[in-house]
Image (spheres, grey):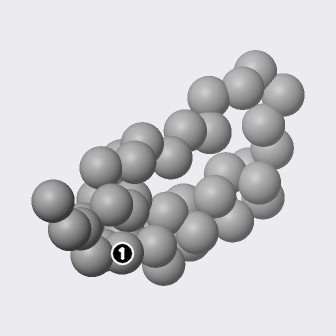
Amino acid sequence: MDYTYDEIAGMIDHSLLNPTTTADAMEKGIDLALQYKTAS
């Protein structure tokens, strides 16, 4: 089965769950997830 980059990225969960995550790191992580169109 062949998958495109966007299909694979859509299957990946991008997690920022860490008790020490700063607001700045959270915003950067969200931007990265949006850029690569990850699942969550």
Residue at 48 percent of width and 78 percent of height: 35
Left of 38 or right of it: where is 22? right
Residue at 55 percent of width and 38 percent of height: 15
Up the image or down, 19 lies above or below 34; here it is: above
Left of 31 or right of it: where is 6? left
Task: Please count the marks in the image.
Answer: 1
Up the image or down, 19 lies above or below 31; here it is: above
Q: Where residue 19 appears, x then y in whole percent?
A: 76, 21
Front one among 7 and 15: 7
Up the image or down, 7 lies above or below 40; here it is: below
Q: Where residue 40 appears, x then y in whole percent?
A: 36, 47
Front one among 22 and 15: 15
Taking the view exactly as shown, the residue that stands out farthest to the top is: 19
Q: Quadrant of the N terminus?
A: bottom left
Dot 1 lies on which element? helix
Quadrant in the rendering for residue 8: bottom left
Residue type for callout 1: Tyr
Residue at 20 percent of width and 68 percent of height: 2
Residue at 77 percent of width and 54 percent of height: 25
Taking the view exactly as shown, the residue that stands out farthest to the front is: 1
Left of 39 or right of it: where is 19? right
Q: Where residue 31 appears, x then y in whole percent?
A: 56, 71
Residue bearing mark 1? 5
Q: Where residue 4 appears, x then y in whole percent?
A: 27, 76
The crowding category of the residue bearing disc 1, from other C-alpha atoms within 10 Å (few below 14, some 14 to 19, many at least 20), is: few
